[in-house]
């Protein structure tokens, strides 16, 4: 009799031979879940203004250091008043896209006024996504993303963030990833508090967003020049501008930089 | 070299090395509950952080759950929200099942213990405080650790700046280390109930001080005050730096 | 003696294309006391007559709240109604938790209908023996839905189910143009109580046997019993 605790509760090898992991299809490795993102999208930035919300994200899908996919759309419209901006793992993003598609379809099945009174509101879409994100993290199998849900609800701008941990928060300006460090201070310079939202026009807001996208393109190595920008406005409705480019950059100084690169000093 | 003969050391390592996903984060913020004679307050700052970033300057974390019970779960915000949601839900079904009977503070506290302990081996990473009036109409505060140990107290601070605020509270609410002048430190200052105004002053002082010394505390202070007339909310700005 | 060979279960049609068990279930509703539901453009109201088994017993429960914005009244087998109202409570709850959304009354009706229909197609089960009037206020406004054990749900402006409900129904049909435009919840309740009276025979309405519920914009589902129904008698 082997008294070592190691063999407690095990069929003894002398009698039964080594434990066969094929029994009950028991895998020899434990089940593995996503532990890191693979192809990624960088920051999503967004802000409220007096008549709606703006959200923007570039079109790049990076594979580590490689700028792998250059035409990825990361702003997903849901119904007529909501846009979801997604950063992080692109395959997980595509899974979320599918979930959102199903959400819309189900709503159409269930309600005769699915395009009217019972249309999906941004807060419905958000709550659903936040539930999915938190449940997945609680299964230790997260969707490796940070999302911003932007939209108009009962005429008022809606903006809320959720990430792979299920952490959620709202603010008049929101940004994910690198944008939270680089773009957010610029956005906050224009809209710092909820009180500033009413004083900010679409024109100012859009200009601020373009400026922020420019700064991100300057400094974020995993960003692209091409980006999309969505406006959800009380008067214009949902407008998505695709294929925008960062304009008016100043690279004049570059030729004067000495000491590294190909030039002779 | 093993002194005890064991085969653990010879067990075949069949699993890959894990770089496991960390399901928790710290979202900063601090909360504070004080019970008075016929009232109770629960206050929290409104800053929401991860690492050195301020995510939001106004993200409330103290909530009115109904039945004169206010609650806050401070720490990992996603767990805090999940716990709060579950408690509110539990309360809703308590009302369905018990013909809209009011949930007492004692019952609420025990219920929350079960919600927390139910996840003993994957805990809600939060410090929870509830405040309200007990069945005699006296102010009451209950505080919980992440896995459900709980206790009724006169006052309790939780979250990022708990260690800064709690000693201040010991001194100012329970008069710890205070002695009657002229007794040569022999006679303790007798404890007495504070008024609502005194308590709100204490809470504001506690939070302005915590804001000075702790980077995860600031932006705004929201106080929920429970009296026999219901729940009242007050907001005071805090430093935003 | 004639014996019906096609009413033993819910999965066998009679040669004339009828499901007798389902039709019997519909009869069970008529055994229950009368229940009236009606709606205006702003509110929806339930009014029900409660019965007591004998003088020493309490009165039955006719109205069940399912959520802040939804509730139902029953006629027929009360235990079956409990099962269905519990189901509806869960569904309302799920909509709130996962979608932050009040369950649409239309959707609630469809869920109940699906659940009832399943019973009529599996062997060994029986249809629910209860009729429900579901009222609620959702994004599209106030609604009244009638549920039947056959798996039918209908959206209506006014409905009455239970014993001698025809009297109330006829009254509602005649009065519809008036109560539809009524502005306050109080007036609509009064119209409901008046309709209920048309279905009474030996009974008189008292604070003990009348149950009222109302829901509307900025007015969560509220139930009135006992002394609170006095003003409407």
Image: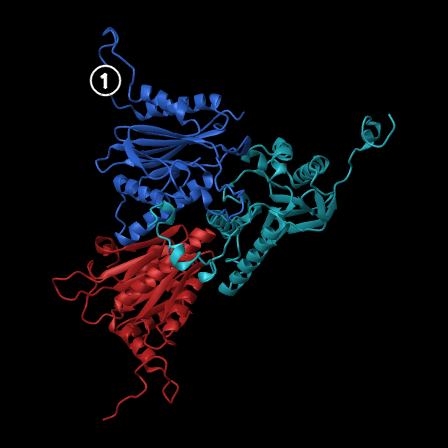
Chain colours: A cyan, B blue, C red
Which residue is at 29% across, 14% downward?
B178
Q: Chain of mark 1?
A: B
Measuring from the top left, give residue B140's x and y in whole percent. 28, 33
- Disc 1 packing (10 Å; few <14; some 14–19; many ≥20): few
Residue corresponding to mark 1:
B190
Out of C195 and A199, give the one closest to the viewer: A199
Can residue B188 be seen from the camera position used here? yes
Above or below for A65 versus C158: above
Give the quadrant of residue C114. bottom left
Out of C26 and A70, give the one closest to the viewer: A70
Furthest toward the bottom, the residue is C1
Can residue A237 be seen from the camera position used here? no
Furthest toward the right, the residue is A264
Measuring from the top left, give residue C26's x and y in whole percent. 31, 76
Which residue is at 29% across, 88% downward?
C4
- Relative to C21, B240 lies left or right: right
């Amino acid at each position: 009799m082997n008294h070592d605790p190691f063999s407690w509760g095990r069929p003894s090898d002398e009698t039964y031979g080594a434990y066969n992991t094929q029994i009950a299809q028991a895998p020899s490795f434990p089940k593995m879940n996503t532990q890191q993102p693979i192809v990624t999208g960088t920051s999503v930035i967004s802000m409220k203004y007096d008549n709606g919300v703006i959200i923007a994200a570039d079109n790049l899908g990076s594979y580590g250091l490689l700028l792998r996919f250059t035409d990825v759309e990361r702003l997903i419209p849901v119904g007529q008043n909501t846009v979801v901006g997604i950063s992080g793992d692109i395959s997980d993003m595509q899974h979320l896209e599918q979930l959102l598609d199903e959400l819309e379809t189900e709503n159409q099945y269930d309600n005769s006024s699915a395009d009217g009174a019972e249309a999906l509101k941004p807060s419905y879409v958000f709550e659903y996504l936040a539930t999915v994100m938190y449940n997945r993290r609680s299964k230790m199998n997260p969707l490796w993303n940070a999302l911003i849900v932007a939209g108009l609800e009962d005429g008022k701008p809606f903006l809320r963030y959720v990430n792979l941990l299920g952490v959620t928060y709202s603010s008049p300006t929101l940004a994910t990833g690198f944008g939270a460090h680089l773009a957010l201070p610029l956005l906050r310079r224009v809209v710092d508090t909820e009180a500033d939202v009413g004083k900010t026009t679409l024109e100012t807001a859009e200009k601020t967003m373009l400026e922020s996208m420019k700064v991100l393109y300057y400094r974020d190595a995993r960003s692209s020049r091409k980006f999309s920008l969505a406006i959800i406005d009380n008067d214009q409705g949902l407008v998505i501008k695709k294929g925008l480019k960062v304009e008016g950059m100043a690279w004049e100084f570059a030729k004067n930089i000495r000491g590294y690169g190909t030039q002779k000093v | 070299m093993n002194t005890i003969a064991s085969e653990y050391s010879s067990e075949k390592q069949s699993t890959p090395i894990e770089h496991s996903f960390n399901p928790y984060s710290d979202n900063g913020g601090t909360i504070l509950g004080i019970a008075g004679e016929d009232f109770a307050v629960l206050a929290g700052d409104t800053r929401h952080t991860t690492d050195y970033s301020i995510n939001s300057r106004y993200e409330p974390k103290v909530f009115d759950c109904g039945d004169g019970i206010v609650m806050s779960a401070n720490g990992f915000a996603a767990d805090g929200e999940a716990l709060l949601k579950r408690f509110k839900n539990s309360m809703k079904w308590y009302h369905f099942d018990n013909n809209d009977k009011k949930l007492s503070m004692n019952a609420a506290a025990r219920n929350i213990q079960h919600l927390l302990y139910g996840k003993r081996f994957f805990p809600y990473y939060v410090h929870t405080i509830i405040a309200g009036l007990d069945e005699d109409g006296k102010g009451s505060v209950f505080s919980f650790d992440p896995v459900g140990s709980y206790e009724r107290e006169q006052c309790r601070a939780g979250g990022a700046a708990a260690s800064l605020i709690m000693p201040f509270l010991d001194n100012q609410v329970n008069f710890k280390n205070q002695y009657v002048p002229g007794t040569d430190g022999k006679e303790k200052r007798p404890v007495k109930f504070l008024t609502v105004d005194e308590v709100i002053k204490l809470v504001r002082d506690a939070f302005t001080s915590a804001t000075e010394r702790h980077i995860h505390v600031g932006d705004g202070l929201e106080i929920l005050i429970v009296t026999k007339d219901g729940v009242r909310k007050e907001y005071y700005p805090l430093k935003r730096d | 003696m004639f014996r019906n060979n096609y009413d033993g279960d819910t999965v066998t049609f009679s040669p004339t294309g009828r499901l007798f068990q389902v039709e019997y279930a519909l009869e069970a509703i008529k055994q229950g006391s009368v229940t009236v539901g009606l709606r205006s453009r702003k509110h929806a109201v339930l009014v029900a007559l409660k019965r007591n088994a004998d003088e020493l017993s309490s009165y039955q429960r006719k109205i069940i709240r399912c959520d802040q914005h939804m509730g139902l009244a029953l006629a027929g087998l009360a235990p079956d109604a409990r099962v269905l109202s519990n189901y509806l409570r869960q569904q309302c709850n799920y909509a709130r938790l996962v979608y932050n959304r009040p369950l649409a009354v239309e959707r609630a009706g469809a869920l109940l209908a699906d659940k009832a229909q399943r019973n009529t197609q599996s062997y060994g089960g029986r249809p629910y023996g209860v009729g429900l009037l579901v009222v609620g206020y959702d994004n599209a406004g106030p609604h009244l839905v009638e549920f039947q054990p056959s798996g039918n749900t209908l959206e209506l402006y006014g409905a009455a189910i239970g014993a001698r409900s025809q009297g109330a129904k006829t009254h509602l049909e005649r009065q519809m143009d008036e109560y539809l435009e009524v502005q306050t919840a109080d007036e609509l309740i009064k119209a409901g109580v008046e309709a209920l009276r048309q279905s009474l025979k030996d009974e008189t309405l008292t604070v003990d046997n009348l149950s009222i519920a109302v829901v509307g914009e900025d007015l969560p589902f509220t139930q009135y019993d006992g002394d609170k129904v006095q003003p409407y008698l």
